[in-house]
Image: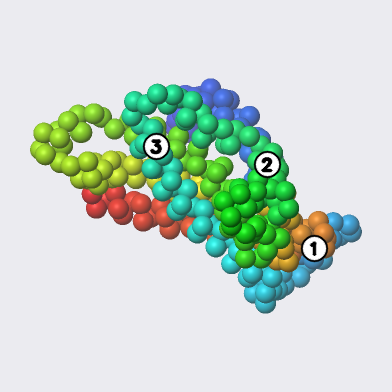
């Protein structure tokens, strides 16, 4: 009896206001993210073509993934695209942030110019990039011919289509990485630089022993976000190449779209989606553990 009275007393003292504030977000998250995720996992164990009842086939879709060479080709394209975009965008964003973290004429305008592609919709950016890289009337080929170089089949050649997408992605992500690194740089106390200068530390030594270690949380954040963006890229490729020529630029999300809405294999598309989710989750956990170990070692 005394225990029951104490439990009721603790329930009465439980603050309700915080839960009321987060309730709308929890409701939206559950409705549009968590429940569809659970439904995708359920459908991945079924054969379903959008019409009719799903037919349970256990792990049949996952067994098919293992033997599907198009899946492995799409996964390989996604990995190559990620390797081409993630480290390069981080390095260029850091270099740009270091260059613009000092007094310059028109500094705000320069920062805004680099950040502009981030606020433009992905489809609009892809349309502009497709026009720039167009094989026949693109601006880039016109510049190459003006300086005496041959034209390049940027979007119709299997060898150049993926590099064209990587260059466009770098153009989009450069501003975002720059802003995050700028915020991290401006949070470093100036006393650290003054103390290092008094000790005779060079610019490189200050960057290596002060700036780079203090930028590790920002680098970790950008690394995770960029990998997720790279594994989820769709609109840019859909507009610029449509996954072609052939299968040269088809990524995992593009392959999921084709399986779900072109060949109407919702179960197989859901299984690929679950595999993609596990890949991103595994990479995030691995990178988080590596980051924690590096911070503990400092």
Q: Kindly identify the residue that appears in the image at 26 percent across and 50 percent down.
A: 296
Mark nearest the camera among 3 and 1 is 3
Q: Is residue 214 above or below residue 275?
A: above
On residue 128, the disc is 2
The Cα–Cα distance between marks 3 and 1, rounded to whole angstroms, is 45 Å
Of the numbered discs 1 and 2, the one sitting upstream in the chain is 2
Of the numbered discs 3 and 1, the one sitting upstream in the chain is 3
Q: Position of residue 112 (x, y in %)?
A: 51, 29
Q: Kindly identify the residue that appears in the image at 28 percent across and 41 percent down.
A: 211
Task: Give the side of residue 89 with respect to residue 54, left or right.
Answer: left
Mark nearest the camera among 1 and 2 is 2
Residue 283 visible to the viewer: yes
On residue 97, the disc is 3
The Cα–Cα distance between marks 2 and 3, rounded to whole angstroms, is 25 Å
Please give the residue where the numbered disc 1 appears in the rendered image.
265
The Cα–Cα distance between marks 1 and 2, rounded to whole angstroms, is 33 Å
Furthest residue toward right: 52
């Amino acid at each position: 009896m005394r225990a029951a009275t104490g439990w009721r007393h603790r329930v009465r003292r439980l603050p309700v206001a915080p839960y009321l504030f987060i309730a709308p977000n929890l409701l939206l998250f559950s409705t549009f993210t968590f429940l569809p995720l659970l439904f995708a996992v359920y459908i991945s164990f079924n054969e379903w073509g959008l019409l009719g009842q799903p037919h349970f086939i256990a792990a049949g879709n996952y067994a098919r993934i293992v033997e599907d060479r198009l899946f492995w080709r799409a996964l390989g394209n996604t990995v190559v695209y990620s390797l081409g975009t993630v480290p390069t965008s981080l390095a260029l964003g850091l270099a740009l942030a270091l260059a613009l973290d000092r007094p310059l004429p028109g500094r705000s305008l320069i920062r805004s110019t680099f950040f502009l592609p981030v606020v433009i919709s992905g489809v609009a950016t892809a349309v502009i990039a497709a026009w720039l890289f167009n094989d026949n009337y693109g601006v880039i080929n016109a510049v190459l011919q003006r300086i005496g170089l041959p034209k390049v089949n940027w979007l119709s050649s299997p060898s150049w289509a993926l590099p064209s997408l990587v260059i466009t992605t770098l153009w989009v992500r450069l501003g975002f990485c720059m802003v995050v690194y700028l915020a991290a740089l401006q949070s470093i106390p100036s006393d650290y630089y003054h103390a290092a200068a008094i000790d005779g530390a060079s610019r490189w030594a200050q960057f290596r022993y002060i700036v780079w270690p203090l930028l590790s949380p920002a680098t970790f954040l950008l690394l995770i976000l960029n990998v997720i963006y790279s594994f989820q890229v769709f609109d840019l490729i859909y507009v610029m190449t449509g996954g072609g020529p052939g299968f040269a630029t088809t990524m995992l999300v593009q392959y999921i779209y084709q399986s779900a809405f072109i060949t109407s294999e919702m179960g197989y598309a859901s299984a690929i989606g679950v595999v993609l989710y596990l890949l991103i989750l595994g990479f995030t956990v691995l990178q988080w553990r590596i980051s924690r170990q590096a911070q503990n070692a400092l």
